[in-house]
Image (cartoon, rainbow, N blue to C red):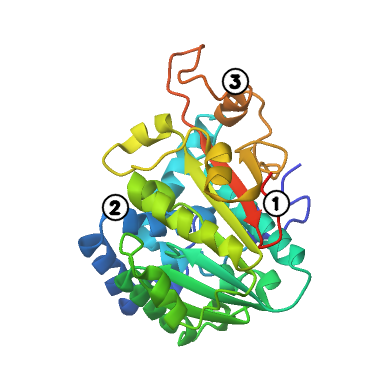
Amino acid sequence: MSNQQNGMPEEMQPWTELKLPDLLSSDAIRELHAAIESEWDSSRRSACQIAAGRALWKHAIHDPLAELFAGETYMRSIYEKIKKDRLNNAREISGVIVAVRTLWFDSKLEAALSSFGGGASQVVLLGAGMDTRPYRLSCLKESSVFEVDYAEVLQVKTNILEAAANSKDEHQHPIMTAKSVRRVAADLTEDDWLEKLRMSEFEPKENTVWVLEGILYYLTQTDAMKVLKSIADKCNLTHTVLLADFMNKQATTLSSSTFQFYSDWPDQLLPSLGFSGVKLSQIGDPDAHFGLLQDPQNLFNKLRNLPRSIQTHPDDGTPCCRLYLLQASGSPNQTIS
């Protein structure tokens, strides 16, 4: 039975024909995305690619701003990849890893905020890119959100949001669901990013969730470890929750010029830095599939069934490229387990 026959709304049907919002073809948005293509490096542009993934998996993720942040180029290119995968009956459809990772972070963020038991809380999005959580997650209604990224990334993001707010189409108007949003221009490879965060009214002693989605592996080993240790140190001040994804060494070979930091055993690394309550998930695990990875023979399910110590797949000799999803916590009165 088709989705139409099931009465599913068109916007919730998987893989409808690509229809881009009119605002995406406006001069203002086109100029912003042209600048992104000509001026940003691959790590910065990846924010638009991720937004396109969220937009095209709209039957799983509600993100009305994703198309604007993605831009027409990435929307069309990823849509064509999805179309090709469907025609070829691929076991993994392009963008599924983005969809699952997004939903995992969403669910763990909501659970972390609930664990604080009410009261003031903060959420810090490191390497925020084109993240839209302050505009789509109701669980942030009592939270102050801080978006940390390069100045040029945050400026373009602000300009796109302003264009949407000024649009004649009210459906494109951003609606903030967080208590507040502050954008902090900072470089995580510099030593002053924490100070810049504090200068933006971040309260070090307030319960905080730190979200590091798709950022650590773009950093060097040294810089990534500094960032993680800085967050771990906050466990001595207040209830702190870390949500982050890690690549194993094999995964960084997918683009050795882009990906740098890795950890084959992040569930051992984090306790050594001072975190407790560490839990590791892989794409396809019970808390990390969301009904999007049903085929037991897809890549992610096959990897889950292999010991993590195995570096190459015994069936075809391909590298075992893994993405680990980690949650960890700490507080002044909590004993490290």
Across and down, in percent, residue 220 comes to 32, 47
Residue 117 drawn above or below residue 7: below
Between marks 3 and 2 in the image, the one whose residue lies nearer the viewer: 3
Residue of label 2 = 42
The residue type indicated by label 1 comes to: Thr
Q: Is residue 225 visible?
A: yes
Q: Which residue is situated farthest in the top direction here?
A: 315
Judge the density around disc 1: few (<14), some (14-19), many (≥20) Cα neighbours within 10 Å.
few
Q: Which residue is mark 3?
A: 306
Residue indicated by mark 1: 335
User: Across the whole image, how many numbered discs are drawn on residues?
Assistant: 3
* Quadrant containing the C terminus in the rendered view: top right
Are the residues tagged 1 and 3 within 8 Å (C-beta)? no
Q: Is residue 132 visible?
A: no
Query: For the residues carrying marks 1 and 3, which lies nearer the camera in this image?
Result: 1
Specify which label sits upstream in the sequence, 3 or 2.
2
Query: Could you give the CA–CA distance between mark 3 and mark 2, rounded to whole angstroms?
Result: 32 Å
Q: Which residue is depicted at the point 32% across and 73% down?
A: 151
Query: Could you tell me residue 322's position as x and y percent?
Result: 50, 33
